[in-house]
Image (tube, grey):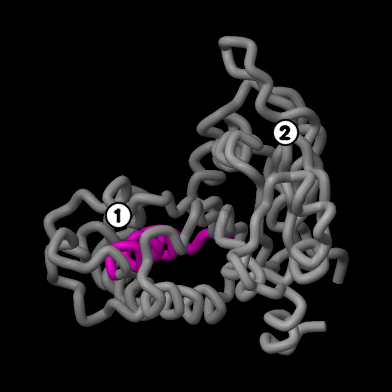
Amino acid sequence: MGPVTPSLEVAGLAFAYPDGHQALFGVDFSISRGERVALLGPNGAGKTTLVLHLNGIHSGGVGTVRVAGLPVGKKHMAEIRRKVGIVFQDPDDQLFMPTVREDVAFGPAAAGLKGPELEERVDRALQQVGMAEFKNRPPHHLSFGQRRRVAVATVLAMEPEILVLDEPSSNLDPASRRELADILRSLDVTVLMVTHDLPYALELCPRSLILSEGTIVADGKTAELLSDDELMRAHRLELPFGYDPRSAAAALGGP
């Protein structure tokens, strides 16, 4: 067996918007198959810009992005978009069909799946997020937390190589937040989680990247980065009042 191709490789990625604002200045990192990694950083650090490069929504910058060994570019775009599943912050950006089933079936059906194979794909994705019994419900009748889980299912139905989650815990009550954490831990897929919710990052992602002013300024064990007061202060990352990442990591069975 040769080395396993990383799920994601970003090398020398730099990008400026048409108005001249430079958002990324040479970003480099690699994520292995099955890793769960958090992307942390203050507002305006370039996190969204970076995510939109992963499936070619943004292009025209310098540097390369490879997903499962395929360069992100026009040639492989359809395949890249299947491999990179982005779950946006607002589930209503992703749910637009009359029923949950139709929303989850939309991507695979567009990719040519039909009949029993399509139903099986839909059922499996809904099962993975604990929403199987809501299959025939209209999404707008669901709670916010349930809609977010269905949004995750719409992406899982494409069987992606990497699941990218933008602020997955935002607007969730504590129970929904925990349910989503349990789901994300149970998935056999590479996860990149963009989040301001540092305790959630520690709970779910053994490794974190800190993006600040368009460059990766730290890449390491989440518990170690969050415990580095100087690093946190320098990049405007704030832990909740009274939260101790060291004891939280110990409680999670970490170092």
Q: Position of residue 217 (x, y in %)?
A: 82, 45
Q: Position of residue 231 (x, y in %)?
A: 82, 52
- Of 125 and 223, nearer the camera is 223
On the image, numbered disc 2 is attached to which residue? 214
Q: Is residue 13 left or right of residue 125?
A: right
Q: Residue at x 77, y 28 (%)?
A: 25
Queried whether the magenta region covers residue 154, the answer comes back as: yes
Q: Amino acid at mark 2?
A: Gly
Q: As drawn, which residue projects farthest toward the right?
A: 2
Q: Residue at x 60, y 34 (%)?
A: 44
Q: As drawn, which residue projects farthest toward the top?
A: 19
Foreground disc of the pair 2, 1: 2
Q: Which residues are magenta?
A: 146-161
On the image, numbered disc 1 is attached to which residue? 109
Quick check: 15 above or below 19?
below
Numbered disc 1: secondary structure: helix
Queried whether the magenta region covers residue 26, the answer comes back as: no
Q: Amino acid at mark 1?
A: Ala
- Quadrant of the image containing the C terminus: bottom right
Q: As drawn, which residue projects farthest toward the front?
A: 242
Mark pair 2, 1: CA separation = 37 Å
Give the quadrant of residue 53.
top right
Quick check: 8 above or below 226?
above
- Quadrant of the image containing the N terminus: bottom right
- Of 62 and 148, nearer the camera is 148
